[in-house]
Amino acid sequence: MSKQFELLKKIGFVRVGGSAEELKAAQILKAEVEAMGIKADIEPFEIEDYVQEVAELEVLEPYNKKYIVRAYRFSENTPDEGIEAPFYYAENMTDVDIANSKGKIILVNGIVRLDLFRKILKSGAVGFISMTGTMLDTDENSDLLQRSTRDTLRAFGNLPAASIRIKDAFEMVKEGASKVKLTVKGQFVTRTSHNVVATIPGTDKADEIVSFGAHFDSVEFSTGVYDNGAGSVINMEILRHFVANPPRRTLQFNWYGSEEMGLLGSKAWVKAHKDELKDHVYMINVDVGGSVLGADQALVLASKEAANYCDSFMRRKGYAVITKQDIYSSDGVPFADNGVPSTSFIRFGTQGAGYIHDRNDIIDWLYPKALERTTKFVQDYAEEMINADVFPFAKVVPPEMTEKVDNYLFKKEMAEAAKLKENK
Ligand SMILES: [Zn+2]
């Protein structure tokens, strides 16, 4: 068994951002770095979190039944006795659904992102429920995921909200639930999450920095080996390589906490290290890997030239990597937002054989060969640019990518929310 796979097993426990387990994983990573004779620091940062106290959903008419639900993280509290209201299945919140939702507790399809959330607020619904999982889930073989009204949503308001298993939502709609009672109560709390950071100084081009990033936290119920213990151990082996083969440019290795809660670790890192970013020429991010059946991709959040360079490199070296100029929802985004281009390397599991963000993200469904292959081409690609006489492309985040970053971070909407607040 490879050393890399051993380390992946070692950190393969549930390690949610801000938890004691996340800190334990940080300490394991730090110890692994320091065993190579390189100093590693654990950098703390604060995150906002939520503790659920009560979450109940009861159908009152035309039948009576209680369903298992989870309060949204950051849900608005209902009164202690809950709220009783007509129930309406608002599907995808069309204009017709919006017109029919006032004063009701509604059920909606899919994940409630900002656009859907704003429609729910606009409708005058008094609470909402969204569904998670699949029709094949039972209470025993699945976990009920907690969803979030994140800060970007709450910039516009808040509502009592809960998530429910899809099979239960199915039953409610099929049986014609028409009146329900929803009770949710919880508290906002502050926790401390952590990044792990290590530096290898460059030899003759030390003032130019290339950083490697991987988030090491997981979501609840998930041992997070695929997402993203894999990226964490891939970067660890790349660090090992450069300890043995000193790089011309300075290398920064960062393992980010709380990525799953909204890229909180990388956002905290760029904030804490803002003055250094002028020296960062590139960021290389690895997020999800190790799947037996799947495909490697490179998403280049940089110029067309940088994307072409990556594609051409992989072809010349015979690495099967699908390369695109695009954004990827991971820790490269806060760097791009600060003018530092990046590439995210990901190995998506093929449909039906790839599990993410649930209890099926397990070590048995990964294997060392996939990790080693990804490590090899990321390292080769990085090494050429790290040791080049002149960096192979300009440090540019072009307008078409900046636009994607701004959309991803809801910049326009946040400005709108700030304006609304001002006018109040
Ligand atoms: Zn991830």
Image (tube, rainbow, N blue to C red):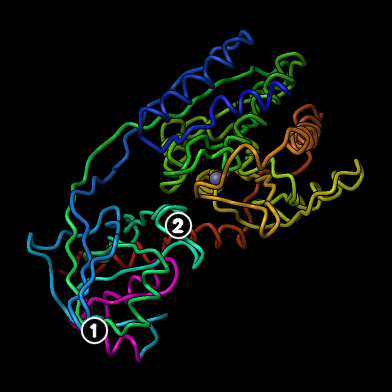
User: Camera-side residue: 320 or 179?
Assistant: 179
Return the x and y of residue 215 as percentages of the image width and height.
53, 37
Q: Does residue 262 show up?
A: yes
Horizontal and vertical percent for residue 204?
73, 17
Q: Give the residue type that dot 1 points to.
A: Ser
Circle 2: element type: loop
Q: Position of residue 120 (x, y in %)?
A: 30, 75
184 is higher (above) or lower (below) than 206: below
Q: Residue at x 34, y 87 (%)?
A: 97
Q: Nearer the viewer, residue 181 or 302?
A: 181
Q: Quadrant of residue 247?
A: top right
Which label number is shown at residue 95?
none
Cα separation, mark 2 vs mark 1, equals 37 Å
Q: To which residue does mark 1 refer?
A: 178
Q: Residue at x 23, y 76 (%)?
A: 105
Q: Is residue 124 found inside the magenta-colored segment of the image?
A: yes
Residue 409's label in the rendered image is 2
Residue range (magenta): 96-125
Q: Amino acid at mark 2?
A: Leu
Closer to us: 347 or 3: 3
Is residue 285 located in the magenta-colored stretch of the structure?
Answer: no
**As drawn, 420 above or below 345:** below
Residue 390 in sight here: no
Q: Nearer the viewer, residue 176 or 254?
A: 176
Instruction: Give above or below for 34 relative to 62.
Output: above
Disc with the residue nearer the chain's start (2 vs 1): 1
Q: Nearer the viewer, mark 2 or mark 1?
A: 1
